[in-house]
Image (spheres, helix red, strand yellow):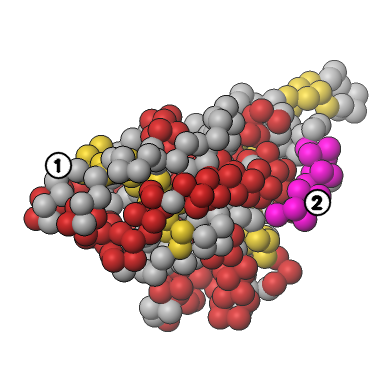
Amino acid sequence: MDSKTDSQKPARNRGSPQKKIPQKNAIVFATPGALDGGGGIGRMTGYVVDQFEKAGAPRSIILDTRGTGSVLLSPFYLGVTLARMAWILALRRASVVHINVSERASFLRKAAVQAVAGLMGCPTVVHLHGASFVEYFEGGIFARAISRWLFNRCGRVVVLGDNWRDYLVQSVRTDPRKIRVLYNAVPDVGADLASRTPPEPGAVLSLLVLANLSERKGIGTLLRACALLKERGQPFHLTIGGGGDIDGYRAMAAGLGVAEECRFLGWIGREEAHAHIRSHDMLLLPSTHEGLPMVILEALSARLPVITTPVGSIPEVLADGETARIIPVNDAGALADAIAQVGRDPVLYGRLAENGRRLFLKQFVIDAYAKSLLAIYQELDRSGTELSGELDKLAESAAAASKRR
């Protein structure tokens, strides 16, 4: 979908009346599932598009490279996307294609997007989101070849942290001059919230997890930790929002004796997720692999204490005992201990809440993130045409924002 209508500007033709032609200023986002069906990538893209609109930046065009239904329909969605993108680029209505990629089949689809953009002479930014990219890349010759081809052909690569940049340079052999580190960012979910009140002694703890239900997100570890809490006499309620293997984990909760304490909501929208973040006592995300989860950043903005694991870019931005509780991967006992500790220690609870909020304001505000993206697009604009009347002003302020990040 197009977030804005095509903008137009007058152009002069020698010996003929003035006529209007489309301005070459669109940003094309190639993303799986578009905004509603793309999970965290779709949410991140939606936040960026919303911020671009608020800032008067170039219009955005969202192209779905995978679809939201059966995987068997994915080639159809990709074909439609490639045809539509080729038409947009042929009309010279876009200045850059922003390609969101994770791992596995995503690389095949995004390589096709890169190939079409390259043939049409349009610059590209490849944005790596894949939490399991290292495993994918090291899984075979073809995975290494397609990954290297994609990162070598694009104009810029955006990664979620220094560890991903180092891996691309050292293992994938990506040109370090084209890599930009840009941590995720989110809207200010807690802008109107006052300081949180720690749970009362002996209170029923309201625990929250917002994730696709899988072992990669540590849901099995979480449910085993809940069983330990119940054995120890700690009262709690766990709200679980997200798609995935809901029936399987519901059965697991029943087998562990914590079915009554666990509420499975299934997939929920952005506004409902924000409401839960604002109303619960803690966010839990004991993942085995991650990039930089947006739900953690949203929790920080709302002063919601976070308990998570040192995977992906999480240990780059969070400090144990200061801005989050960080526990070992696949350790249900450590997770149960951390939940109980945060719940009974008001000093620790308050420190995590307030430090998390300060970190969010310093490093994860969506406005600065959007300006940094615009600056990257500006680097790639080789046509001599401004992306929009306001983009240069926004790009000029991005350098300071990037330094703060």
Residue 389 vertical position relative to residue 293 in the rendered view, above or below:
above
Evaluate whether residue 41 shows in this view: no
Mark 2 vs 1: CB contact within 8 A: no
Can you tell which mark lies on residue 260?
Answer: 1
> Measuring 66% from the left and 28% from the top, which residue is drawn there?
54
Q: Secondary structure at mark 1?
A: loop
Q: Residues within 10 Å of mark 2 (few under 14, many from 20)?
A: some
Q: Amino acid at mark 1?
A: Glu
Q: CA distance from mark 2 to mark 1?
A: 51 Å
User: On the picture, is 210 further left or further right than 179?
Assistant: left
> Measuring 12% from the left and 56% from the top, which residue is drawn there?
256
> Measuring 60% from the left and 26% from the top, which residue is drawn there?
4
Q: Quadrant of the C terminus?
A: bottom right
Q: Position of residue 338 (x, y in %)?
A: 38, 59
Please state the extent of the stretch shown in magenta in the rendering.
391-405
Residue in the foreground of this view, choosing between 196 and 22: 196
User: On the picture, is 306 further left or further right than 125?
Assistant: left
Q: Amino acid at mark 2?
A: Ala
Residue 405 vertical position relative to residue 39 in the rendered view, above or below:
below
Q: Position of residue 261 (x, y in %)?
A: 19, 43
Among the 4 quarters of the image, the one containing residue 193: top right
Task: Please check the rendered image and state whether residue 395 is part of the magenta-colored stretch, yes or no.
Answer: yes
Q: Main secondary structure of the magenta part?
A: helix
Can you tell which mark lies on residue 399?
Answer: 2
Which label sits in the foreground, 2 or 1?
1
**Going by the picture, which residue comes out furthest to the left?**
255
Q: Position of residue 177 (x, y in %)?
A: 73, 69
User: On the picture, is 385 further left or further right than 108?
Assistant: right
Q: Earlier in the sequence, mark 2 or mark 1?
A: 1
Q: Position of residue 294 (x, y in %)?
A: 49, 48
